[in-house]
Amino acid sequence: MYLDLHSHSVSSDDSRATVEQYLKWIQVLRKRGHTVDGIVLTEHRKFDADKDYSALAAQYGVMVLKGSELDTRYGHFLVYGVTPALTSELNFADVRMDARALMQAARHHGAIALPAHPGRFGIGLVEYLAQGEQFDGLGIVERLNGGSRPGENERAEELCQQRGYLGTGGSDAHLASHIATCLTKFEAPIRRESDLVQALLSGQFRPVRLAETSQASAGG
């Protein structure tokens, strides 16, 4: 399955794309021969527990999962498998939260948190590792980010090679036409957020660019 693990709808304060606009654009990509099975909405500093996209997902034949992108003292972290217990324990709007506490709480509540765009200049995980910070238990980072500037994905790639981290891919889309520029290819079928967490924990995935899906069979 090919999933875009990093996207923002108008629910995020800096995005101009609706979920339906993303799903419509994915139809265009499919007509061009690409395979895009689903997206994960990772809204900034929040989790939209009240939003239900199942009707839209069924209408367009695209899986829509929900996650979060949280600001921490050590850069941005993507959270998958968010549960009510996790949102009760942590204030998702707290931009000064300790990323290590986030990672620990996420795993305790059946979720997983991993660094977004770690190679991003100024705010990526690479910067904090260079300052001597340690992140025990970290094994996965976002390796391919569609919104990265030249050199940033390269720094993420180098980080993965140096430390043996696995890498995901996501578009970081804020505009409809940016969706699915980078994705993650999973070996296991995914139907819900809990499946996504288990697939990430399994390690059976890799980041890809959209062009790499053009020869894939429809449906992953």
Image: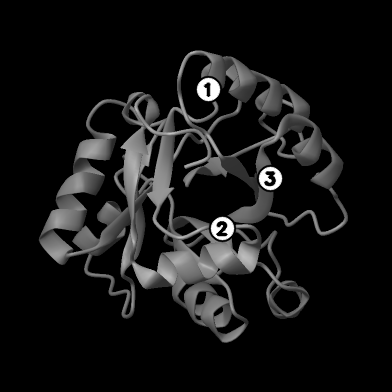
Q: Is residue 181 above or below residue 25?
A: below
In the picture, measured across the screen, residue 29 lies left or right of residue 126, that is right
Mark 1 = which residue?
A: 178
Residues at marks 1 and 2, CA–CA distance in whole angstroms: 23 Å
Residue 197 position within the rendered picture, expressed as x and y whole percent measured from the top left: 53, 68
Q: Nearer the viewer, residue 35 or 68?
A: 35
Q: Secondary structure at mark 2?
A: loop
Which mark sits nearer the N-terminus, 1 or 2? 1
Q: Is residue 155 above or below residue 135?
A: above
Residues at marks 2 and 3, CA–CA distance in whole angstroms: 11 Å
Q: Residues within 10 Å of mark 1 (few under 14, many from 20)?
A: some
The residue positioned farthest toward the left in the image shown: 162
Residue 96 visible in the picture: no
In the picture, measured across the screen, residue 38 lies left or right of residue 152, that is right
In the picture, measured across the screen, residue 203 lies left or right of residue 219, that is left
- Label for residue 64? 3
Q: Secondary structure at mark 3?
A: strand
The label nearer to you, 1 versus 3, is 3
Mark 2 = which residue?
A: 190
Q: Quadrant of residue 110?
A: bottom right
Q: Nearer the viewer, residue 173 or 132?
A: 173
Residues at marks 1 and 3, CA–CA distance in whole angstroms: 16 Å
- Label for residue 161? none
Name the residue type under label 2. Ile
Q: Quadrant of residue 195?
A: bottom right
Which mark sits nearer the N-terminus, 1 or 3? 3
Residue 100 position within the rendered picture, expressed as x and y whole percent measured from the top left: 44, 76
Give the residue displayed 24% in from the left and 63% down from the top: 165
The label nearer to you, 1 versus 2, is 2
Name the residue type under label 3. Val
Q: Secondary structure at mark 1?
A: helix
